[in-house]
C-alpha cells in the first residue's frame, strides 16, 4: 500500500494510493453507572467484553467514509464498572485499486488506519472515568472482514 498526497502515483501505475482526508469522533459515550462505589480497589479482575464493527459508505467516486465502532464494558460479578461506545470515522480517498478489490481494501485498510487513534480515545476515556487505561489489543481487520463476509453469505437465501 502506497500513501501519497494525490492521485499522481496511481495515474503512473504505481499501485494503490490511500489518503486520509479527515478523521473524527462521530459518537462517544462513556458510562460509569456505579461511581463512586465502582472506583474502589477491586478484589478480582473485571470481565472485559469488546465488540468491533466496521461500516463504510461511498461519498464520491474515490472518497469513502469509514466508521470504526468500538463497544465494550467491564463487569465484576455482573455489576458494570464501566461501559463505552465509540464511533471513530474517517474520510479516505482511494485511487489505483481495481474495482473487484475495492470493497476489501476499504473495509480492511481504512479501519487499520483508524484503529490506533480509536484505541487511544478509549484508553483515555476509561482513564478519565477513574480506572486504569484500557488498551485494546491489535485487531486483524482482514480476519474480521472474512468473518463478516462468511456471516453475510450464510444469511443469504439460496436460490
Image: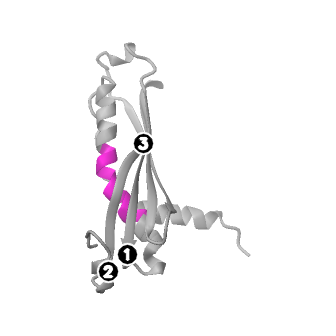
Q: Which corner quadrant holds the C terminus? A: bottom right
Q: CA distance from mark 1 to mark 3?
A: 33 Å
Q: Is residue 109 magenta?
A: yes
**Mark 1 and mark 2 in contact (Cβ < 8 Å)?**
yes
Local packing at callout 2 (Cα closer than 10 Å; few below 14, some 14-19, many 20+) is: some
Seen in the image, is 58 located left or right of residue 105?
right
Say which residue label 3 marks: 50
- The residue sitting at 38% across, 47% down in the picture is 24
Local packing at callout 1 (Cα closer than 10 Å; few below 14, some 14-19, many 20+) is: many
List x then y, in percent, for residue 74.
40, 31
**Above or below, 126 relative to 96:** above
Residue 142 is at least partly visible in this image: no
From the image, state whether disc 1 or disc 3 is nearer to you: 1
Q: CA distance from mark 2 to mark 3?
A: 37 Å
List x then y, in percent, for residue 34.
44, 17
Seen in the image, is 54 located left or right of residue 16?
right
- The residue sitting at 34% across, 38% down in the picture is 122
Q: Is residue 110 magenta?
A: yes
The disc label shown at residue 95, or none: 1
**Which SS class for mark 2?**
helix
Say which residue label 2 marks: 10
- The residue sitting at 32% across, 28% down in the picture is 45
Seen in the image, is 79 located left or right of residue 152?
left
Q: Which corner quadrant holds the N terminus? A: bottom left
Q: Residue furthest right?
A: 159
From the image, state whether disc 2 or disc 3 is nearer to you: 2
Residue 73 is at least partly visible in this image: yes
The first of marks 1 and 3 along the sequence is: 3
List x then y, in percent, for residue 18.
33, 68
| Chief SS of the magenta region | helix
**Which SS class for mark 1?**
strand
Amino acid at each position: 500500500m502506497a500513501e501519497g498526497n494525490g492521485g499522481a502515483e496511481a495515474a503512473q501505475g504505481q499501485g494503490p494510493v490511500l489518503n486520509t482526508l479527515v478523521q473524527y469522533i462521530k459518537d462517544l459515550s462513556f458510562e460509569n453507572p456505579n461511581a463512586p462505589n465502582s472506583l474502589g480497589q477491586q478484589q478480582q479482575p473485571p470481565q472485559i467484553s469488546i465488540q468491533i464493527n466496521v461500516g463504510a459508505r461511498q461519498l464520491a467516486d474515490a472518497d469513502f467514509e469509514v466508521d470504526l465502532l468500538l463497544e465494550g464494558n467491564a463487569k465484576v460479578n455482573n455489576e458494570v464498572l464501566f461501559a463505552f461506545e465509540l464511533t471513530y470515522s474517517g474520510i479516505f480517498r482511494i485511487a489505483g485499486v481495481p474495482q473487484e478489490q475495492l470493497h476489501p481494501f476499504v473495509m480492511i485498510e481504512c479501519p487499520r488506519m483508524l484503529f490506533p487513534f480509536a484505541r487511544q480515545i478509549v484508553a483515555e476515556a476509561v482513564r478519565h472515568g477513574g480506572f486504569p487505561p484500557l488498551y485494546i489489543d491489535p485487531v486483524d481487520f482482514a480476519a474480521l472482514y472474512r468473518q463478516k463476509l462468511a456471516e453475510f453469505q450464510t444469511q443469504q437465501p439460496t436460490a
